[in-house]
Image (cartoon, grey):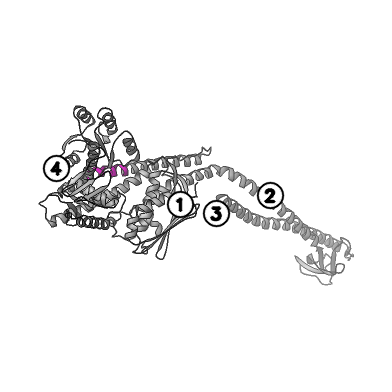
Amino acid sequence: MKILLIEDEKELCRSIEAYLTQENYLCEYAMTYDHAIEKINLYLYDCVVVDITLPDGTGLDIIRDLKKNKKETGIIIISAKNSLDDKITGLDIGADDFLTKPFHLSELNARIKSIIRRRTFGGNNEIIINEIQILPDQMQVMVNGKEIILTKKEFDLLIFFISNKNRVLTKEAIAEHLWGEEIDMADSFDFIYTHIKNLRKKMLEKGGNDYINTIYGMGYKFVVE
Amino acid sequence: MKLLTRISLSYIAFSFIAFVIGGVIFSNVIRSIFYTQIDDNLRTEKLLIEEQINYSDSLPDFRLVFGHLIEVTVFNAPCKKYESIKDTLLFNKKKSELLPYRQLVAKNTSLHQRGYLIRIFMPIDETETLIKTIIIALTLFFLALLALLIYVNYFISRSVWNPFYRTLESLTRYDISRSTPLLLQDSKISEFKQLNKTLDHMSKKLQQDYRSLKEFNENASHEIQTPLAIIKSKLELLVQNEALNGDQMRIINSVFEATNRMSKLNQGLLLISKIDNNQFPIAEKINFRLLIEKSLEHFEELISLKKICVTVSFSQSIEREMNRSLAEILISNLLSNAIRHNIEEGEIQVLMDAENLTISNTGHPLTLPPNELFERFRKSDRNSDSAGLGLAIVKRILHIYNYPIDYTVDGSIHQLKISFNNRN
């Protein structure tokens, strides 16, 4: 899987690259508009992560170019301006998703995975991890072939864990993923605990393994050997 | 006190004092003129009588000569010379009352070596009446003149001060947070011209400073975002390191939490400066009832976690033109405040009628006057995790649309009331 990262802040590029490389993505980055246009015209990427504000142009033009020439590429906008206009314009001209800086790397990773999943497998993709089988579009989860009924939040949580398996997910990242930015962090940590407890219980009931580890008050980790 | 009232009052007071002093002097002058005249007459009469005595050595009957009383007594022995004029009262038989007279008493020795005493009484009641009439007539005339002058003065002052009042009105309506410049009308009077020029200069300077301050705020918040994003991403990479032990993890966790707080704070400040810079211009019709219902649904888990009882009563639904993002932030901030600062098993009451939205909740008593909480970074509980920007943002949003908000506390009940009516 090839990913192009268009972002003018070098250190941010490096962090994202480091995180995504560990997910076995081939990650390249471009720090200027010209460089980015050159790259997307030369190579084919599965997903492009693009910053709207670039020193020599706007990311919106890159998206227009991509939509014209490389329709199959997934597009995620990342923007420091949490302006509604940019978001609407970006999604209008064909971007798949929109993330506001600062974001969690785990969140970006989950969004990239979701886009690639949708683009690669269409409607009938499934995720299999040992005894767990998930049909994301039908919101169906089976453990050892037996279906378990999850609430919307528990399902989102499970997908988020699996997208970032073997990674430490901070409580903040989980909270933002489930409730959005405006929720007060301190209040939401209690729910995370409740949701994780319920999710774990439901999976154990059907003979599944306990994958979710707690990491020193920092967060949780979905460990798959 | 209004300027014109003040001017008129001073005018009246000074005119009154001048009038009283002038009146006293005037009446004394009149009286002394009349009395000098009377005294001169008395002396002339006396001289005539003396001439008669000296010439004929007889005593003619003067009683009726001049229509007033004259008494002459002649002694055989010589008299020492003496003369005085004074006021006195005599009984008038005709009118049967005491009337004022001017009395001349003179003693002397005639050429025939006989002493005589002359007493002449001149009635002055008519003179007094005359003086009084003159004074009254003049007083009336002066009062009429004064009234006219005050009236004229009032109108002149009003037209002279008119540019000042217009300037004052423009100043009252001037709001630095809005970009409309201070518009002052020209005046022909040089002092007002100068005043307007100075004010114009000051307002331009103020606006410029205000703008650069706003720009600084926005730029600073904006620039802080990138390093924050880098710190957060590096920390996230760092915690993936398997070799970290518990203590190290806890330190990273603290750094992470502080960074998150700063990030939230920065986002709040950025939002405020965006609101102040009018970067949410697009307005649409917002149904606040739907918005509140949606927001409450969003906070459902928080509400149930704190076991808060929410009562909602919409007697009417308010619909107003507003920017959607701002309206959502407004409602979300108000409700999350009501939840966050609530107590376990507390209550929230949302009331809406045709013009007002009232959100009240149970909570802890405040340590600050309620309206101070609309300022940035003001919080009742110093140790709380919140940035203290929620209500400041609420206030800024409502300021754009000219809707007043009021915060009252009654014991443990906190009430925020927005009036969607007072549009100017």
Of the numbered discs 1 and 3, the one sitting upstream in the chain is 3
Of the numbered discs 2 and 1, the one sitting upstream in the chain is 2
Give the class, few, some or many, for how many residues have Cα within 10 Å of label 1's Cα (few <14, many ≥20). Answer: some
Q: CA distance from mark 4 to mark 2?
A: 101 Å
* Magenta residues (range): B217-227
The correct choice, above or below, for A189 with respect to A118 in the image is: below
Q: CA distance from mark 1 to mark 4?
A: 54 Å
Mark 3 belongs to which amino acid?
Met
Q: Which residue is mark 1?
A: B404
Quadrant housing residue B381: bottom left
* The magenta stretch spans residue A65: no
Q: Residue at x 17, y 52 (%)?
A: A221
Label 3 element class:
loop
Give the class, few, some or many, for how many residues have Cα within 10 Å of label 2's Cα (few <14, many ≥20). Answer: few
Q: Are marks 2 and 1 on the same chain?
A: yes
Q: Is residue A83 visible?
A: yes
Label annotation for residue B145: 2
